[in-house]
Amino acid sequence: MANGIVYLVGSGPGDPGLVTLRAREIIGLAEVIVYDRLIAEGALSWARPDAELIYVGKLPDRHTLRQEEINQLLVQKAAEGRVVCRLKGGDPFVFGRGGEEALALLEAGLPFEVVPGVTAGIGGSAYAGIPVTHRSVATSVAFVTGHEDPTKAESGINWAGLATGTDTLVFYMGVSNLPLIVARLIEHGRPADTPAAVIERGTTPAQRVVTAPLHEIASRVEQADIRAPALILVGQVAGLREQLGWFDSRPLFGRRVLVTRTREQASALSERLRRLGAVPLELPLIEVQALDAYEALDAALDDMARFDWLVFTSANGVAAVRERLRARGLDTRDLRGPRVAAIGPGTAEPLEQIGVRVDLIPERFIAESLADGLEAQGMAGSRVLIARAEEAREVLPERLAAAGAEVIVAPCYRTAPRAGAGEELQVLLSEGRIDVATFASSSAVEAFAACVAPEGIGDALGGVAIACIGPVTAQTAEAHGLRVDVLPEEHTIPALIEALVAYCRGRD
Ligand code: SAH
C-alpha cells in the first residue's frame, strides 16, 4: 500500500534517443505502464517482462470521458500500492493533460512525480533544422493549441497578442485547422509572407517538413497530404531550415534496410546505416554454430610452427580460432610461426584487435584475389593452414595446392539458417517494410532465398532493392533469380554503404 505512486513521464517526440535517463529508469521499474499512442518508438521494450501494459490511446471524439477514466485508472492502480508509469509523448505538462492527472492523484491523496520530456515543439523543430529562438531574429516563442475551434466567437486564444507579440509560434494539434489559424494570424497583423513550416512526425524516420510563406502554407500542406501528428511553426526562424536542415537530408534518411548478417556482426553495419539516417532492420538469417569436433584445427594449433601461412577468410573464423585457443588453454602466443593472411579488412581488424599482425591482405577481398596474393609470395613447398567455415568454396585450397603448397583446411565453424528467421522475414515483406536488403555472404543469400517463396521470388520481393557485398554473393543472388541493384567495387561494408548511398541518390 505504502509503495503506490504514479510517475507522469514524458517520452519525448518519437526518437528513442530523446528519452531521458530518468524516463527510461522509470519505464524499467514500473509495475504498471499506462501509455498513449504517441510514445517514443521502442520505449515499451524497456519495461519489465511482468509489467502490466495498459493502452489508453485517446479516441478524438471521446476526449473528456476518456480522460476521467484515465485519471480513475491511475488513482486505482496507485491505491492498490502499485508503481505506475503514466507514459506520454513529448512532455507530460505540455498539452499532455499531466496537470489534470496530477490533480486527480493529489485529490486522492496519492503521491506522484513528474518526469519532463522533450516536447514536440522543441524536438520536432530542432530535427527540422529550425531553432525556435535565434539571435536578432526571434527572442520569444509560444506553444499554442491549434485544437480549439477557431470559428467560435469566444476564443481562449489571444490572437491579436500572438500574431504580433510573439516571434515564433508553435501550434500543436492544428493541422486540420491550419487554414483558419493562418487566416486569424494574418487578420490580426502577422505579415502574410512570414516563413512557416509544418513538421509531420518530427524526429522519426518518417519525418516530413513542408515550408512556405504563411499565406501559402495551407495549400502546400494539403498538396503534400500532411497528417497528424504535426506541428505548425510560424516565424522568421522557419527560414533557417533551408540552411540548417540536418536530419531528413541525410543520405539514407528514412530508408528501411534489412541487415541479414549474424547477430554478432550486424551491429557495426546497423550503426553505420543509422548514422546516415537509415532505419536498420536487423534480421539475422544465419547463425554461427560451433562444430562437434575440431580435429584439424586442434592438431594445427598444437604445432603452428610447422606452417608458413595461416589464412583467415572471415571474421567468424578469427572468432572461432580465438575461442578454440581459449578452450585448449592456449593463446595468441601459440600462433607464432606462420605469416598471417586475411581476406579483407573486416577479417584483418579482429586479428589486429587480438594482437595478431596481418602480413597479407589481397587487392580485392575475394578468395581468387587472396590466392593471387599468396601465389605471389611463392607457394611451392610451403605449408598453408586455412581456418574457415565447414562449407566454403574450394577455390582457395585448390589453387594453392596447384601452386605447390601443402594445404590443410581446418573447419572452425559452420553457418546455418537461423530458426524463426523465415517467419520474421515474411512479416516484414508482407507489410512492405523493407526498402533494401543487404547481403554480406552467399550463405545469407541462400537463407533468404529459402525463406522467400522460391517460385515467385520477384513477386514476393516487390520493390525491395538487393545490395550484395561482392561478386560471389551477387552471383548466388542472381542464381536465385534476384536482381542485384547495389554491388560495390571494393568488397567491404563501408564500400557497400557508399554504393547504397549512390544508389539511393540516383533514385531520389
Ligand atoms: N505532450 C506532447 C503533446 C501532445 S499533444 C508534447 O509535449 O509534445 C499532441 C500533438 O503534439 C500532436 O497533435 C502534434 O501537434 C504534436 N506532436 C507530438 N508528437 C509529434 C511529432 N513527433 N511531430 C510533430 N508533432 C508532434
Image (cartoon, helix red, strand yellow):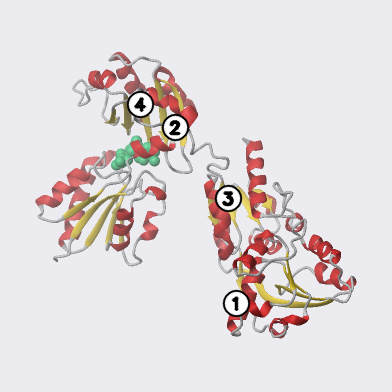
| Residue at (41% x, 30% y) in the render | 198
Q: Which residue is mark 3?
A: 257
For this view, does 210 lie left or right of residue 76?
A: right
Q: CA distance from mark 1 to mark 3?
A: 31 Å
Label 1 neighbour load within 10 Å: few <14, some 14-19, many 20+: some
Q: Earlier in the sequence, mark 2 or mark 1?
A: 2
Q: Is residue 419 above or below residue 5?
A: below
Q: Amino acid at mark 1?
A: Glu
Marks 1 and 3 in Cβ contact (< 8 Å): no
- Which mark is nearer the camera, 4 or 1? 4
Of the 4 image quadrants, the one containing the N terminus is bottom left
Q: Which residue is mark 4?
A: 135
Q: Amino acid at mark 3?
A: Val
Q: Earlier in the sequence, mark 4 or mark 3?
A: 4
Based on the displayed image, in which of its 4 quarters is residue 142 positioned? top left
Q: CA distance from mark 2 to mark 4?
A: 30 Å
Give the structural element (helix, strand or loop) at label 2.
Answer: loop
Q: Is mark 4 within 8 Å of ligand 1?
A: no
Q: Which mark is residue 226?
A: 2
Quadrant of the rendered image holding ligand 1: top left
| Residue at (75% x, 69% y) in the render | 392
Q: Which residue is mark 1?
A: 323
Give the structural element (helix, strand or loop) at label 1.
Answer: helix
- Which mark is nearer the camera, 2 or 4? 4
Q: CA distance from mark 4 to mark 3?
A: 40 Å
